[in-house]
Each structure stands twice: as C-alpha cells, then as structure tokens.
Image (spheres, grey):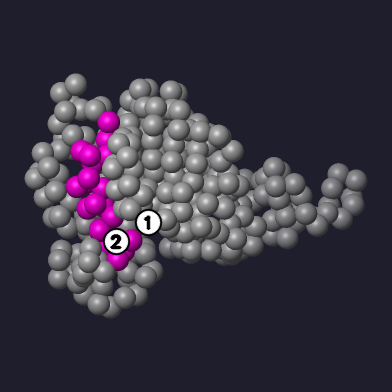
C-alpha cells in the first residue's frame, strides 16, 4: 500500500502495490494470461483520493465510501505488506509488524515536514532528531531541506527504530543512537557539542505526573528540550518541535522564562486519536478538567490543534 500526500496536505492518494494487486485488487494474471500471485512492490494501481485528510488512517472517511471501495481500502490498511509513505518526493517503507513499538509516520509527521520546507535551513551543518521513530523527518531533512548538512544524529529509546532507520536511510551523514535522549544530550552538552538544528515530534499531550513519572509520556521530553535549547543550540541554531493545544501552559511558560524567540510555522486541527489516551479514563478525565471539550465533527468526538514551533535563543535572532 502506498500513501501519498500532496505537498500542501490537501489530498491523500491511496495506491495498492505489490502482492496486493493480486490478493486484493484482482490483477492475478499477466499479459500472457499466466497466473500471478505477487507483483513487484514497484508496481502500483491508484485506488482512491481523500480530500483534506486529518489522519493517515481516517476510519470515519473510509466508512462513508461505497461498500466495495470501503472494504477494499480497509483491506489495504490491514494488509500484511509494508506501508510506503510518501511526501514531497520522500518515501519511507514502514512495517508495524517488523518494527514493533515504533511510531510510524502520522499526519503530524507530514505537517512537520511541510513546516520544515518553509524554513531557511541553508546554513544548517549539524542536526539531531529526538524521538525519531521511523526516521521520516530526518530523511526529509537529508533529502529536501538542508543542502549543507554534514551530520544528523537520530535518537530513540527503542532499538527497533534503529532497524527501521537502517532499512530506509542509507545516507552516511546519518547515525542512530539508542537510549534516553535527555541523558545523551546532557552528556553532549558537557562535551561542548552544539547543534544548528534540533527537531523533535515528541509526545505532546500532558498527563498527570508525567514529568516526574515518565518523560516519554506527557510533555516531559518537550519541556526538557525547550528548557535546554539555549545550551544545546549553536549561535544561530533553532529547535523545531510540535506543541499541542493539549500541552497546557508549561511549554509557553518555559519559552517566556528562558526569553526564547518563538514562531508558529504551521498548524492543523486533528482528531484526538491516540488510543492509549482516549481509552485511559484517568488520563481523559484529567484532560477534560484542563480544557479538552467534546466537539463531535467529521466522525470524531475530540480534537486538538497541533502547532509546529520554531524556537530560538534571543542571540540567534539578533545575529
């Protein structure tokens, strides 16, 4: 299955490819009438376009389709073959069964890349991605936005993320480190390492006690990155990160206290479709007590605004 987003994110084109052509789309014979069980993954057939997508997998929009098309697309999403995600000429193959526990590309991934395409990264030589997951954002930076990039470090706590990156990024400027990003960056700072660009699409939905209990749930990692940005960035460096309307006041309080220059580069309203959040009564009760409202529209009950922020120390803006 190929999921191809337009550069302005106004359209998602869905294609069947490879073995799906025979098993789902009915193309089970070649030009000579011989039975075909599996086509090369490079061979694809267009299936459907979704206008103004707000999710990579929008079950509600799919459910509104004519029954055969509906069931065909559900079958493609559930196919055991890897999903090929494409945006602005960059392609990444992701297999959730192979890379267990790794976050694959989502709608905020592509919004992040759209925002990066609008920034001037022409002087960036060193970069790091925190919580890289599948590695799509780093691959986009390598291929599309930073022509002078010399090295990019990808950090994730999950070793399976490293496997995904190894399978998809062959550029020798990229290297992967497994571990706690907060400890790795703290050590890097002690060694005097600074970066021209730090990117992170971190967890951005606050959770009770998340900062003390687990920096990889809630906004602990996000808060750390904003707090430490002046120490970690080079003189003209920038932190690009995602902040949600569900992140609460803390990120902006840190930005103000640290006297950081902040600009929202792009934003999008998306459904709250994080299952371990919406199925966790304590977490949802907490969010409802802190501003989340039920707003049923387009098939979903809860929404958030995700915003891509460009954050810089004041010294960088003055330079």
**As drawn, is 25 to the left or to the right of 234?**
right
Instruction: Report the predominant secondary structure element of the magenta stretch.
Output: helix
**Vertical comparison of 300 with 319: above or below:** below
**As drawn, is 2 to the left or to the right of 52?**
right
Mark toward the start of the polypeptide (1 vs 2)? 1
| Real-space Cα separation, disc 1 to disc 2, in angstroms | 9 Å
Which secondary structure, mark 1?
Answer: loop
**As drawn, is 301 to the left or to the right of 100?**
left
Residue at 32% across / 69% down in the picture? 277
The boundaries of the magenta stretch are: 214-234
Residue at 73% across / 55% down in the picture? 19
Residue at 38% across / 69% down in the picture? 275
Most foreground residue, 101 or 274: 101
Q: Position of residue 152 (x, y in %)?
A: 44, 37
Most foreground residue, 74 or 168: 168
Residue at 34% across / 75% down in the picture? 279
Most foreground residue, 27 or 277: 277
| Disc ID at residue 215 | 2
Which quadrant, please, contains the C terminus?
Answer: top left
| Disc ID at residue 180 | 1
């Amino acid at each position: 299955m190929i999921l191809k987003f337009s550069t302005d994110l106004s359209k998602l084109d869905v294609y069947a490819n490879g073995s799906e052509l025979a098993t789902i789309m009915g193309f089970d014979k070649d030009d000579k009438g011989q039975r075909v069980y599996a086509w090369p993954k490079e061979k694809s057939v267009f299936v459907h376009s979704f206008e103004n997508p707000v999710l990579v997998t929008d079950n509600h929009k799919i459910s509104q389709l004519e029954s055969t098309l509906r069931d065909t697309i559900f079958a493609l999403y559930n196919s055991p073959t890897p999903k090929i995600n494409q945006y602005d000429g960059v392609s990444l193959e992701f297999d959730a069964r192979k890379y267990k526990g790794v976050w694959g590309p989502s709608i905020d991934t592509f919004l992040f890349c759209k925002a990066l395409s609008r920034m001037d990264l022409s002087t960036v030589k060193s970069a790091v991605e925190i919580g890289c997951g599948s590695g799509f954002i780093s691959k986009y930076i390598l291929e599309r936005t930073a022509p002078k990039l010399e090295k990019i470090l990808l950090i994730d706590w999950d070793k399976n993320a490293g496997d995904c990156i190894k399978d998809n990024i062959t550029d020798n400027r990229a290297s992967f480190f497994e571990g706690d990003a907060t400890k790795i960056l703290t050590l890097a700072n002690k060694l005097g390492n600074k970066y021209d660009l730090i990117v992170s699409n971190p967890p951005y939905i606050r959770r009770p006690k998340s900062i003390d209990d687990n920096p990889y749930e809630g906004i602990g990692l996000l808060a750390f990155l904003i707090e430490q940005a002046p120490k970690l960035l080079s003189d003209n460096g920038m932190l690009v990160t995602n902040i949600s309307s569900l992140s609460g006041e803390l990120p902006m309080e840190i930005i103000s206290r640290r006297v950081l220059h902040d600009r929202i580069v792009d934003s999008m309203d998306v459904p709250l479709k994080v299952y371990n959040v919406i199925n966790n009564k304590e977490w949802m009760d907490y969010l409802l007590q802190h501003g989340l409202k039920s707003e049923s529209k387009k098939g979903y009950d809860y929404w958030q605004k995700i915003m891509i922020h460009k954050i810089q120390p004041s010294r960088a803006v003055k330079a």
